[in-house]
Image (cartoon, rainbow, N blue to C red):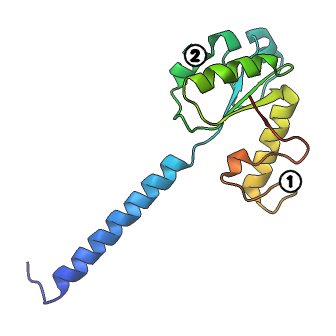
Amino acid sequence: MNTKPGDERIMDKALKTLFLAAMLLFSAGSLAQSPIFIDVRSTEEFQEGHVAGAELIPHEEIAAGIARLQPALDTPLYLYCRSGRRAGLAAEVLRELGYSRVINLETLENAQNMQEQMLLCAKSSDAPGCSRQETPAETAPAAFPPREG
């Protein structure tokens, strides 16, 4: 290969830049976890209606169900049931397993509102009820802030 003086330095700089760009893309991808909506109600309740794309994991099966999904420990997990009681029980188990972003939305209606708001905020962070928080996945509708637990 025929190289001119300085070509090696330019190639070295280009390779370093390419490597840095690849590392940034990998890091950004691993940090931006897509939220998972988890319906902890019964199969019958789930069949009557649920959040689009929600995972059905009855609250008494939460440990085995989350093991099947294997999300990262920092993935936002949005739980809901009929009143919030079962979601609260499941949230405790998930926290004991090391999940750090567990949010009890309490009811199906709240979960649907959250999902709608997340879609709206994804289109425009200037939309009503959207704010520039750490991640858009945790932007709560102004109507109800999610409860931890």
Q: Residue at x 81, y 13 (%)?
A: 45
Crowding at mark 2 (Cα within 10 Å: few <14, some 14-19, many 20+): some
Q: Where is residue 50? Give x, y as percent.
A: 79, 24
Left or right: 73 with respect to 119?
left
Residue 20 in picture, x, y percent from top left: 36, 65
Name the residue that disc number 2 marks. 63
Q: Is residue 58 visible?
A: no
Image quadrant of residue 15? bottom left
What residue is at 57 percent from the left and 43 percent from the top?
A: 33
Q: Is residue 10 left or right of residue 24?
A: left
Residue 43 position, x and y percent, is 74, 11
Q: Residue furthest bottom?
A: 5
Query: Residue at (61%, 24%) from the top-left corner?
Result: 94
Residue 104, placed above or below residue 35: above
Out of 84 and 21, give the one closest to the viewer.
84
Residue 18 location, x and y as percent? 34, 67
Q: Quadrant of the C terminus?
A: top right
For this view, does 98 lie left or right of residue 6? Answer: right
What amino acid is labelled 1 in the image?
Gly
Q: Secondary structure at mark 1?
A: loop
**Quadrant in the picture for residue 134:** bottom right
User: Tag 2's secondary structure?
Assistant: helix
**Quarter of the figure that contains the N terminus:** bottom left
Q: Residue at x 63, y 11 (%)?
A: 61
Q: State which quadrant residue 55 falls in.
A: top right
Is residue 12 shown above or below 130? Answer: below
Instruction: Give the CA separation, mark 2 to mark 1.
Output: 33 Å
Which amino acid type is marked by label 2?
Answer: Ala
Q: Which mark is residue 129?
A: 1
